[in-house]
Image: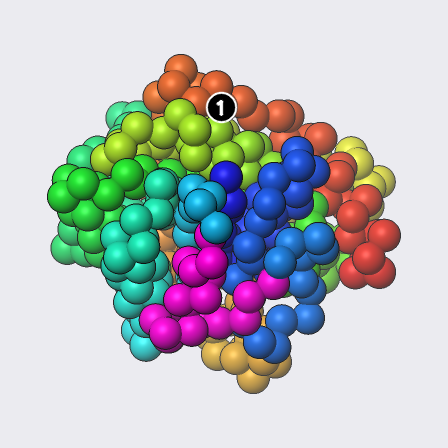
Amino acid sequence: MLYFITGAAGHLGSVITRQLINSGKQVRALILPNEKHTPEKAKLYFGDVRDKESLRPCFENLNGRQLVVIHCAGIVSIASKFNQAVYDVNVTGTKNIVDLCREYSASKLVYVSSVHAIPEKPNGITITEITEFSPEHVVGLYAKTKAEATAYVLDAARQGLNACVVHPSGITGPYDHGRGHLTTLVIDYYKRRLTSGVNGGYDFVDVRDVADGIIASCDKGRQGECYILSNRFFKVGEILDMLHEITGKRKIKNYLPIWFVKITAPLAELYYKILKQPPLFTSYSIYTLNSNAQFSHQKATSELGYTTREMKATLKDTVNWLKENGRI
């Protein structure tokens, strides 16, 4: 059995790669040519999911081995405006992977979608897996691209491809070499750049638990099925209070109402654009923090054996990893 992982230099992709290699599996890792942080011990393939021909070597020379494809590559965006690169990577890139899986008869495809691809339900109603996806039913560019790509994967599964879909919630945890939104929150809090919190929250989950769920789905995920890989809803205040307990840094006492942050978010997007940094809050991220984030991972738990760890342990490991890597 051979595993091929796209987006292997990203936060989730690198953790999946590490966990597979630690369990003795052979891994082909797709990374962009200019990546700084590359997975160790995996066979590296340089390419771009937008360029179908650059992906072919990853599917060839299997020498009789079965190929399991984990499609992690994607751009997670909380930006409010349309961005062609987000569409091209998330939609066109996924179509390229699906088409090659069919052409080369891959034994399994696990597509990493997002809970954002699932239409929101009214507050108080738990969100569970669905079978029909459409960009028309979700809000925001990122959600629309993930919904369109998910629909393409499930259509291929209905036509015979052995593919399943996973929907992680808000991924956090150690090993994030980029600027994931919760990683940025931890850094800003630790460096005392964060003076106020925001009312609202989301379902945050440890990257290692999501990686375990994805690896389990390679064996146990049923063809054409979707699995939510979530944890539970956390208020932003809960996260910041835990960081206060872990680090001993100043407790955040001021929390801004959502309506106020909504008004100032467009200015913040402009400010961070000037700084050439991703904004912590955008109009879309504020929408997300105020949306229904009551997801159920019961299906993944019963079918895949999926489990989650305590958020305080996740945040503690994140702080320690950021310290070890000189980020805080």
Residue 191 vertical placement versus 36 (above, below): above
Horizontally, residue 146 falls left or right of residue 136, namely right
The answer to whether residue 187 is visible is yes
Of 59 and 219, which appears nearest the observer?
59
The spot of residue 61 in percent (x, y) is 47, 58
The spot of residue 206 in percent (x, y) is 59, 37
The spot of residue 325 in percent (x, y) is 82, 57
The spot of residue 196 in percent (x, y) is 62, 53
Which residue is painted at 44% across and 45% down in the image?
Answer: 64
Residue 88 vertical placement versus 194 (above, below): below
**Residue 206, magenta (yes or no):** no
Horizontally, residue 119 falls left or right of residue 251, namely left
**Residue 59, magenta (yes or no):** yes
Which residue is painted at 85% across and 52% down in the image?
Answer: 324
Query: Can you say which quadrant of the picture contains the C terminus?
Result: bottom right
Local packing at callout 1 (Cα closer than 10 Å; few below 14, some 14-19, many 20+) is many
Please, what is the three-letter code of the amino acid marked with disc 1? Answer: Tyr
Residue 230 vertical placement versus 89 (above, below): above
Which residue is painted at 79% across and 36% down in the image?
Answer: 246
Of 262 and 272, which appears nearest the observer?
272
- Looking at the rendering, the stretch of residues picked out in magenta corresponds to 44-62
The answer to whether residue 145 is visible is no
Of 112 and 33, which appears nearest the observer?
33
Give the image quarter of residue 35.
Answer: bottom right
Q: Which residue is mark 1?
A: 306
Q: Tally the marks.
A: 1
Horizontally, residue 96 falls left or right of residue 304, namely left
